[in-house]
Image (spheres, helix red, strand yellow):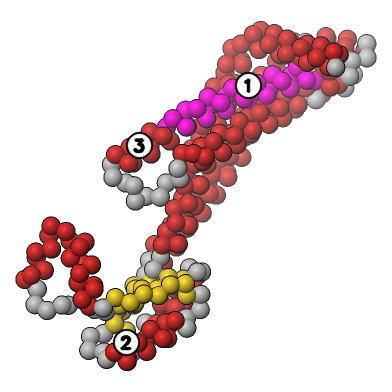
Amino acid sequence: MTCMLNSFGYFLRETAHSLIHNKFMAIASVLTVTLSMFILGVFLAVVLNMNHMAGYLESQVEMSVYLKDGLTTEQVMGVGQRLKALPDLSDLSFTNKDQAMEEFRERLGDQAAILDAVNGNPLPSSYRLSFSRPDSLKEAAAQVSQYAEVESVQYGQDIIEQLYKVSQAIRVSGIILIVFLAGAELFIISNTIRLTVFARRREIQIMKYVGATNGFIRWPFLFEGMIIGLVGSGIASAVLWELYKVMLNEAAAAGLLFIPFIGIYPFMLHVTLLLLGAGILIGMLGSAISIRKYMKV
């Protein structure tokens, strides 16, 4: 145990010495990781929110079936019976003409007085349907629109499809950007560590000759890369967390609460942990790449 603690202390001292000795390159690497991880975090937050919004809107999609005027009670009930038999139907409700007018008045609020000038009730009776599988909605709409008693069918499937197309485009772009940013971080960190390794190459060779293991030589450099990745991704996460909080507050102040953003907690905690893990992993890989050839004596 004492030997392990002594070795760990040696690794930390060597890491600190290297970072201080090459402070300008270390700062440049941290800033590069910070910028890359911030951009990565922004894209991740956007993609996850788009998927969340798509899922929310999908669950809220309803099909409205507007009936023709002059139908008998038996005809209206007959349409309801056929609607109940539709595949994947999860909910069905009926609104008669009087109920439709009352709901319309409530939506108009202070402007409801304009309806007093309207003769009669022009609003149709309607059925509202929701489905457990949104894919079934489009087929059901095509089928129901052929009913002789039905005036029209309305639903928001086209909006959902467009939203998914945008979400898919953002997801693909995000993956490409993630790969690019990870490659850039590997390049910057590996070059920073390579300068340190090159300056100490003779020392490394001597240590190898006297019997030092590859792990004993390698760990200080791995720690250096991990610290660079951790600090850079930590700064990026803190900035991203604060900006996301500001965005949610501004959305609430602007009355955009109807937009289903993901709540800040635990969402941003998960994003932060992901960025920290990615930063540490990339830093370690960059260091491992840099010192690989110097391990061969």
Tag 3: residue type? Asn
Marks 2, 3: nearer the viewer: 2
Which image quarter is the C terminus in? top right
Q: Which mark is residue 249?
A: 3
Find residue 37 and report its horizontal and vertical position in percent: 55, 32
Does label 1 or label 3 sit earlier along the sequence? 1
In terms of depth relative to the viewer, which is nearer, 229 or 70?
70
In the rendered image, which residue does mark 1 sit on? 228
Q: Quadrant of residue 4?
A: top right
Residue sitting nearer the eye, 179 or 62:
62
Mark 1 Cα-neighbour bin, 10 Å: few <14, some 14–19, many ≥20 = many
Vertical side of 238 occupied by 112: above or below: below
With respect to residue 258, does 161 lie above or below? Answer: below
Residue 76: image tag: 2
| 93 is higher (above) or lower (below) than 232 | below
Residue at 51% from the left image edge and 34% from the top image edge: 39
Give the magenta part as a residue range: 218-243
Where residue 74 appears, as percent x and y from the top left, is 32, 92
Q: Amino acid at mark 1?
A: Ile
Instruction: Point out the image quarter for the N terminus.
Output: top right
